[in-house]
Every structure is written in structure tokens, then in C-alpha cells.
Image: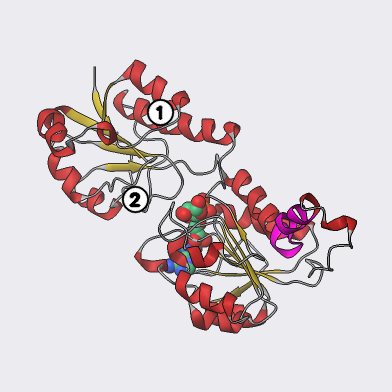
Amino acid sequence: MTEIIMTGPLMAYAADQLKKRFTVHELWKAEDRAAMLREVGDKVRGVAGGGSHVKIDGSLFDALPKLEIVSNFGVGYDNVDAKEAGKRGLIVTNTPDVLTDEVADLALGLLLATVRQLPQVDRYLRAGKWLEKAYPLTTSLRTRKVGIVGLGRIGKAVASRLEAFGIPVAYHGRTRQADVSYRYYPSLVEMAADVDTLVSVAPGGASTHHMINAEVLKALGPNGILVNVGRGTVVDEQALIEALKNKVILSAGLDVFEDEPRVPAELIAIDHIVLLPHVGSASVHTREAMGQLLVDNLASWFDGKGPLTPVAETPWTKKA
Ligand code: A2R
């Protein structure tokens, strides 16, 4: 059987399929990972990635001389050095599309929860405070203009939901998109100044690192709300903490953080914001679809049919 490495725990739905089809080495379980790699490294042809914070980079590739493909769980693959994989002629795949609607649904839920303070309202009722008086009035989605940072697959699904809610949408990215009529801002600071709500769905990695910084938050202003369902590294978390403490912006709804699963105590101490433990795609339905795509990419590759969803850095064209 073809031998592969799993770098972290995947849901049983996917892991059980992998174990039927491949000889699976569970890297994150090894007491001595280097020893495991020395022992099995020259037999391994595939990596099933995700589910852990093990970096899939040049040093892992060095230990796996027969490696052909990294099938990564999730649409984001900032845990994989895809550029380095490309240089070495390896294929990297991710799990796009199958989670788009789920994450977009969550983004709208998180936006509404933040604007209307739903977790705080729930806590208020449970604490018996409604018996004393009604919950104070909140801000509203009704008057808001939303700027989407990263109008990709998920960003577009967020935008179409916002349209249904009657909310004007603008976007920032590196390129204007011909197929949408939303206003495009080449400058993120200028967009932040013109809207009062930012929804970030941009990927992680060097090019987006701390893109939402103190200057952007200042431009967003005192009625501003930041929702982040993309990657935590896109936001300068320390600048965000300062902005929230000093009322530079009004509030935030965060599903992603810079150093997951560690969330700064300073954020946890701010009661009026909404914090979620990276659950954007975390339903049984969608996680199974993602797991299936991870398995299918490996199966397709080792059946000689090529990868199903290779990432941009490792394009693949079928040989004639
Ligand atoms: O920049 P563009 O025009 O290529 O637009 C992409 C945008 N993006 C950026 N925007 C500003 N500065 C950057 N350095 C930058 N790099 C990328 O992010 C594109 O509109 C969007 C990503 O869209 P997709 O590749 O279609 O990804 P998808 O499926 O929407 O997922 C987005 C992210 C994942 O990477 C995970 O981190 C997270 O959502 O789950």
C-alpha cells in the first residue's frame, strides 16, 4: 500500500478512509518525530495535512525524498510552504468551495451577533437582569456600509448575503474584479474611511500580514466594527486591542486569531466584543465535505488521474 503521513488528527470520517486506502503514519502522535521521519521518510509519497500546527515546509520535504503530494485540510494553506513545494515539483491541494457557504453563513451570524450584541443579551437574560429592566438599545446593521477585505469565493458569498439584507458593499483586494458591480478600493485605508464595517475574508501569509493595522482601524472610526473570519494574522491583534480599549472603533467579531488556540487575555476581558474559537466551517456537514475532498485529492493522484483542487502555487496540467 502507498504510504502517507498525517501531520495532525483529522476527523474519523476522513482518517478512516485514509487508513483503508493507505498505510498511514501519524506524525503528531510520535514521541520523537525526527525518529519517525528517519524510519519511514523514504517510503512516504503523500502527506495529509491540517488539524495540527505542524508546519509543512522545506524541512519536512527534505525528510520525505519520495513525496509527491500534500493534501491539506481547509481552504487556507498558510501552514504549507506551497512556493517551496512548487519549486520541488510537488503538488499541494486544499479544500475550496465546499466550505464557502458555511463560512459565509457564519460571517453573517457573527456580524449580526456583534452588531446586536447577541451573546451579551443572552448572558443578560440568564443572569436574571431582564426582570429588573430591558437590555439597553444596541447599534444596528440597518445604517451600515460594509467593506469586504478579500472578495474571493467566500467574500462573494458574504457580499450576496449582505445584498439580500439590503446593505451596501464595497471591497478591497489586489485586483479589481470585472464580474462584480461593488465599489472597488485599491486602498484599504480609503475603504475603511468610507465604510463603518469591515469583514475580512483574506487568506493568511506574508502578503496579508497585519494588513488591518492601527491606521486602518483609525480610518474605520468610532462607530466601526471589524469582523474577521479569514485568518488571524491579517489583523494586527495588539493594534486591535488598543483600538477597542481606546474606543477608536466600536466593536469586533472574531473567529480567527494570530496564535490559535491562544487568545490574548486582553481580548477576552473586553466584554462587548464577540469571540469564536475558529468555527467558520465547523459543522458536521461541511467538515465531512472537506474531509472527503482531502481524501479524494490523494485517491485521484495515486490513481494517476491528477489532483482535483491544486493550489495556485503548484498548478497541474494533465499530460497528453
Ligand atoms: O487580491 P486578489 O484580487 O487576488 O483577491 C484575493 C484576496 N487577497 C488579497 N487581498 C488583499 N491583499 C492581499 N495580499 C491579498 N491576497 C489575497 O483574498 C481574493 O479575493 C481573496 C481570497 O479568495 P479565494 O482565494 O477565493 O479564497 P476563499 O475560498 O474565499 O477563502 C479565503 C480565506 C482562506 O484563505 C482562509 O484563510 C479563510 O478564508 O478560510
Quarter of the image holding residue 203? bottom left
Label ID, residue 295: 1
Going 51% across and 83% down the picture, which residue do you hit? 215
Q: Position of residue 116 (x, y in %)?
A: 77, 62
Going by the numbered disc 2, the residue's amino acid type is: Asn
Q: Position of residue 162 (x, y in %)?
A: 73, 59
Of 95 and 234, nearer the camera is: 234
Going 59% across and 82% down the picture, which residue do you hit? 246
Q: CA distance from mark 2 to mark 1?
A: 18 Å
In the image, is the residue at mark 1 within 8 Å of ligand 1 by its beta carbon?
no
Crowdedness near tag 1: few (<14), some (14–19) or many (≥20) residues, C-alpha within 10 Å:
many
Judged left or right of residue 315, residue 87 is: left
Of 68 and 126, nearer the camera is: 126
Task: Identify the magenta region.
Answer: 112-124
Q: Which residue is mark 2?
A: 79
205 up-or-down from 280: above or below: below
64 up-or-down from 113: above or below: above
Q: Which type of secondary structure does the marked residue at label 1 adopt?
A: helix
Residue 118 seen by the camera: yes
Q: Which type of secondary structure does the marked residue at label 2 adopt?
A: loop
Label ID, residue 160: none
Crowdedness near tag 2: few (<14), some (14–19) or many (≥20) residues, C-alpha within 10 Å:
some
Of 211 and 35, nearer the camera is: 35
Going 42% across and 59% down the picture, which residue do you hit? 204
Look at the image and tell me in which quarter the C terminus lies: top left
Q: Is residue 262 magenta?
A: no
Decide which of tag 2 and tag 1 comes sooner along the chain: 2
